[in-house]
């Protein structure tokens, strides 16, 4: 697979807050890779085969998976515009709290083991790369404005699950300047319109939690009234990655959950 950087020649147009790049063709958005290099490579191969030249990344490059440096290097080498996830923010600054929400003390203990392992196995170049990433990005798909965040526009670690009250999304839509809000963090893809805003959860490339172990990401295409969205699923050898997780000394439950997409 080629790892040459992609350079966009798309024009820019101005909004009140910043200069925004406008893309005429389809745009792929990847999130939540979590140190899973084979899943990322499979996703990029699929995107390349589709002839899609524009890719954005919604963060959480590291954590839970065995390839933090390799994932960071590939994202950086491809020149993919990327924002930080809660994991990237912590590891890039050598913090021991990833800002994750844990249901049980056992989950918290496992999560802390992931943070400790990732801090120890992520090199300085990768940490420096994650440290300079920003909170959000704005870009255009055709005439439609897109706002990319990791968790929500309010907090990097807010979980926007599909079954949360519609009133929450209506409030977020009312305060959103763009036409489409794209995010991840929950590892469960969904697409729904609230108010005038299309909400797009891309799912997770490297650690799905929706019962389907194939990597997930979104492709955005300009439509007449809004951005058209497809959630792509790509197969890869998740059993081999699970074996690497165990061999790396990460908790075996991470390997089990990867295969079960739990």
Image: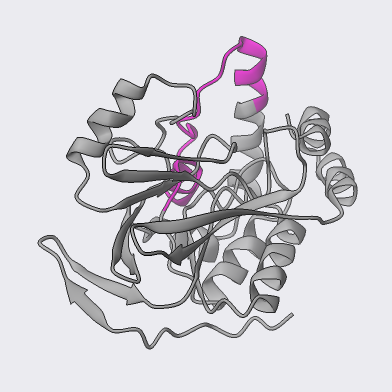
* Residue at 67%, 24% in the rendered image: 110
Position of 103 relative to 222 (above/below): above
Relative to 20, is 155 above or below?
above
Which residue: 47% across, 53% down? 58
Count all numbered tags in the image, as a single digit: 0
- Queried whether the magenta region covers residue 52, the answer comes back as no
Q: Position of residue 220 (x, y in %)?
A: 48, 62
Which residue in the rendered view is the most extreme toward the top?
Answer: 104
Relative image position of residue 210 (x, y in whole percent): 68, 33
Q: Give the residue at x 74% y 64%.
A: 42
- Up the image or down, 71 lies above or below 13; here it is above
Q: Position of residue 75 (x, y in %)?
A: 56, 68
Out of 8 and 124, give the one closest to the viewer.
8
The answer to which quarter of the image holds residue 255 is: top right
Quadrant the C terminus occupies = top right
Q: Residue furthest left?
A: 16
Instruction: Tell me the magenta residue range.
Output: 84-110
**Residue at position x 27%, y 30% in the image:** 170
């Amino acid at each position: 697979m080629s790892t040459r950087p992609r350079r966009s020649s798309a024009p820019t147009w101005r909004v009140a807050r910043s200069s925004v790049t406008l893309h005429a063709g389809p745009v792929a958005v990847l999130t939540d890779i979590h140190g899973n290099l084979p899943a990322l490579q499979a996703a990029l191969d699929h995107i390349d085969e589709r002839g899609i030249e524009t890719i954005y990344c919604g963060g959480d490059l590291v954590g839970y998976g065995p390839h933090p440096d390799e994932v960071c290097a590939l994202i950086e080498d491809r020149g993919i515009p990327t924002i930080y996830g809660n994991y990237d923010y912590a590891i890039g600054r050598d913090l021991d709290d990833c800002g994750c929400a844990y249901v049980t003390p056992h989950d918290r203990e496992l999560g802390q083991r992931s943070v400790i392992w990732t801090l120890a196995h992520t090199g300085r170049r990768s940490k420096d790369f994650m440290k300079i990433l920003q909170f959000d990005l704005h870009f255009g798909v055709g005439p439609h404005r897109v706002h990319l965040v990791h968790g929500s526009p309010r907090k990097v670690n807010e979980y926007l699950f599909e079954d949360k009250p519609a009133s929450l999304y209506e409030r977020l839509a009312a305060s959103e300047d763009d036409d489409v809000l794209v995010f991840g963090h929950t590892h469960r893809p969904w697409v729904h319109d609230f108010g005038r805003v299309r909400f797009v959860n891309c799912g997770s490339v490297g650690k799905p939690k929706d019962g389907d172990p194939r990597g997930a990401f979104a492709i955005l295409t300009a439509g007449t009234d809004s951005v058209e969205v497809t959630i792509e699923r790509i197969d890869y050898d998740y059993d081999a990655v699970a074996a690497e997780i165990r061999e790396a000394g990460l908790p075996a439950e991470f390997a089990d959950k990867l295969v079960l997409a739990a």
